[in-house]
Amino acid sequence: MVWVVSAGMLAGSFFCLVSAFGTLRMKDSYARMHVATKSVAFGGALLVITYVLAQPTVTNLVVGVLVVSFFYMTLPLAGHFLGRTIYRRGIDPARPFKVDEAKGWIILHDPSQE
Amino acid sequence: MFTVSALYSEIGPLIPNWVIVCSALMLILALVFTLIRFYIGPRTPDRIVALDLVAGLTLAALLLSGIASGSEFYLQSVLGFSLVLFLGTVAMARYLDRSDGNDRHE
């Protein structure tokens, strides 16, 4: 059991490190947004599961389920908001879009209109 | 396996020391990478992404210290702090979405 908890701690920290390394190394803002929100949600959820395994009380089980569901509800949603903001600011991706389905639906930001 | 009693952990003191040290070093390295991105981020949304990641890494560090120390109250503070993280990121993204946010002087 101790080794399961140790492996969970190391794996959760490793996925957080992967997320930060991708944030440093990715080429454009969209990829950075993606890697900064999804991977850290996985690492945090792994750490929460490790926490519940390390201290198996009923309170920790209930709160742990709540925290994991909050992570997986809120972090990709925040990533969605950030991606919409990046698109609306008119920041170009590293390679041009092959298909741009948001064109015409998300209006680009124009400061002269306000 | 599941007990109701709090303030008791069998596993916390048994974790090897090098596991805790290696996990903490990985989180510190991740924070350094994220702060480098926060410093060199060419536009404002990159900096907001880096701040969001800093908040997530803080949650990870809180969970790690909770596992290592054996107290159960860290998980409940993580529950509250994750909501603040989400609201803060959404507030900054919406602010940048609606304001003219002139960052073109860079």
Image (tube, coloured by chain):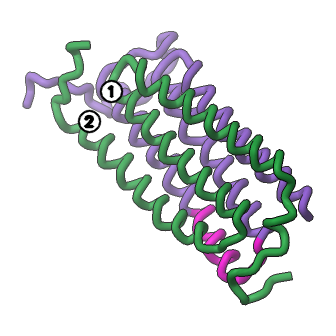
Chain colours: A purple, B green
Q: Residue at x 49, y 41 (%)?
A: B54
Most foreground residue, B18 or A12: B18
Q: Main secondary structure of the magenta part?
A: helix
Of tags 1 and 2, the one toward the viewer is 1
Q: Chain of mark 1?
A: B
Q: Residue at x 61, y 51 (%)?
A: B60
Most foreground residue, A97 or B61: B61
> Residue B21 location, x and y as percent?
75, 44
Specify the quadrant of the image occupied by residue B29.
top right
Secondary structure state at the residue bearing disc 1:
helix
Q: CA distance from mark 1 to mark 2?
A: 8 Å
Specify the quadrant of the image occupied by residue A100.
top left
Write down the residue under mark 2.
Answer: B96
Most foreground residue, A93 or A106: A93
Please say if B77 is above or below B18.
below
Q: Name the quarter where the C terminus of chain B is drawn.
A: top left
Residue A45 as seen in the image, left or right of residue A35:
right
Q: Which residues are magenta?
A: A55-69
Write down the residue under mark 1.
Answer: B44
Circle 1/circle 2 CB separation < 8 Å: yes
Amino acid carrying mark 2 in the image: Leu
Please say if B39 is above or below B59.
above
* Residue A100 on the magenta span: no
Q: Residues within 10 Å of mark 1 (few under 14, many from 20)?
A: some
> Residue A84 location, x and y as percent?
38, 35
Q: Chain of mark 2?
A: B
The residue sitting at the bottom extreme is B4
> Residue B33 location, x and y as percent?
56, 27
Please say if A4 is above or below B97.
below
